[in-house]
Image (tube, rainbow, N blue to C red):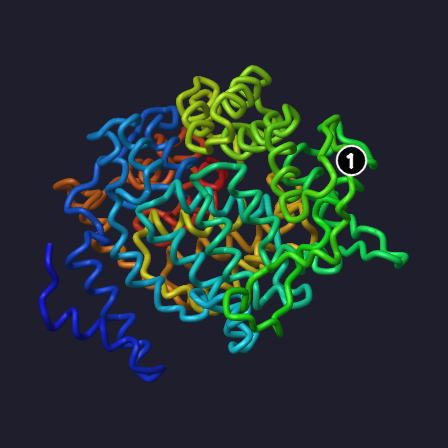
Amino acid sequence: MSLDRRALLKTAACGAGGAWLSGCERAATEINRRFFGEGVPARLDVADAPEIDPDFHLLSRAAFGPWPGDLQRLKSMGREAWLEEQLNPSSISDTACDLRAERFESLYFSAGDAYEFRKPVLREEITRHSLLRAIYSRRQLFEVMVEFWTDHLNIDLEKGDCVYLKPEDDREVARKHALGNFRDLIRASATSPAMLVYLDGVSNKVRKDTDDRPNENYARELLELHTLGVHGGYTQQDVLEAARCLSGWTFDRKRFLALDAGRSFFKPAWHDNGEKRLLGQVIPAGGGAADLDRLVDIVCAHPGTARFIAEKLCRRFVSLEPPGALVQSVAAEFSRARGDIPSLLRVIFRSQEFMDARGRLLKRPFKFMVSALRALAADTRAEKAILEPLQRMGHGLFQYPTPDGYPDDELPWMGTLMWRWNFALALAGGRQPGVRVGRAPLEKALSRGKTKPALETWFAHFTGRAPTSAERTALEVFPGDLPQMAGLILASPAFQRC
């Protein structure tokens, strides 16, 4: 559907300067609602069986929760067709989200050129961009996998120059390969300027006639966190040999050669060019820069990597204690498909183990916030006011201080539940700064010809199932107080788990 000329011109004016910003963002919101269906359908059906609806379950795990209308669309097209569509994100038009999220200039600069920006601008823009993409993108599984790989290859913005380098890493590593091939993902990360700085690869040098020793920081995390896992069967000698393979790769923002400005590069004089023995395989002497590719090939093809990545994916999407048979199936597919990420996700989301795990995972704060905003069809620009509650919940984006990334385990998140409850009540009550929630369209769509939607309808809309008798009794304390009731549902264990 084409936009009218005035709407397009109004949106185009957003690039004219900061004074236009708020008006342009409001214009983008209006265009999204009028032309791209980013609102609430006229009628909403809910899944109100005693158990969580299977389609709702898929949207809760393979997406950041359903936007109003997503459940009907999935049921209309079928789970298999929906999954295949999501696994091919380029086939999905995401214009509405692009209008919201593509206005952050710093995200499109190379690692070297990003030094032109101030640190607070870089922090704000990459964080806002990630939150907006998660809320509004129709490529939901893609965004879920971007979050997964961002944790898997964690980089803290606060170390060294990482704040200048992470935008390119986000673009060229996590986003470029989120639904691609695992080997390509690891290869891209290994030479990412942000990763070279974060894990000290920039100083990994073995020069002749010096006392230099390989810097093992990145090599250790490559084996322990990124590929084989701590129980993957590697030794300390393997860590040293991997570090030797990686020696010579570095980044220098002051290097202004035409072809290499702002990029990582290989410095032959810093490389240990001798023979290496890694995980039982010999890497011949004289390989130079190609030693890195040989290293990546070896670790990505190792059976330990297949099992480690399979288990980590199953923990994220199925259960914190995933069934061994499913992990084995996913690991076998990893080896068969040579790390093709969509192939692994097909095994997981088609499995009975996935369907049997409904309502068992605690949402991490980011997913909790995004799923609540999506359920209410909220309008936000992802500014400071909405980022602060996420910070208080302990899930500030790109801020985890250690290389293992934010945890999937429940215990680390239990100490911030009060902040979740406060956010849920404020959001549903229209008191959360930085967000607009239009309850009237949602109430009308859920009423389905009745005066007002019943308590059970609201509960099913948010959770994918009917309330238990105990849940119904607790919510009936607030008859007619929709904001209070909706806030309590969002704060309840039924919504906080998926």
> Image check: 460 left or right of 487?
left
Q: Position of residue 116 (x, y in %)?
A: 52, 78
> Residue placed at 45% from the left, 32% from the top?
470
User: Could you say which is closer to the camera, residue 261 or residue 358?
Assistant: 261
Asked if one can make out residue 409 in the rendered structure from this viewpoint, the answer is no
> Image check: 388 left or right of 285?
left
Q: Quadrant of residue 50?
A: top left
User: Could you say which is closer to the camera, residue 205 or residue 342?
Assistant: 205
Q: Position of residue 468 (x, y in %)?
A: 41, 29
> Residue placed at 52% from the left, 37% from the top?
182
Quarter of the image that includes the N terminus: bottom left
Q: Quadrant of residue 455?
A: top left
> Image check: 430 left or right of 153?
left
In the image, residue 317 sits, relative to residue 245, either above or below, namely above
> Image check: 337 left or right of 462?
right
> Residue placed at 30% from the left, 26% from the top?
80
Q: Position of residue 402 (x, y in %)?
A: 70, 52
Q: Position of residue 386 (x, y in %)?
A: 45, 64
Circle 1 Cα neighbour tier, 10 Å, few/some/many (<14 / 14–19 / ≥20) = some
Asked if one can make out residue 260 in the rendered structure from this viewpoint, the answer is yes
In the image, residue 91 sits, relative to residue 466, either above or below, namely below
Which residue is most to the top? 325
Q: Amino acid at mark 1?
A: Asp
User: Could you say which is closer to the camera, residue 182 or residue 389?
Assistant: 182
Q: Disc 1 designates what residue?
A: 238
> Residue placed at 33% from the left, 36% from the top?
460
SS at mark 1?
helix
Give the mark count. 1
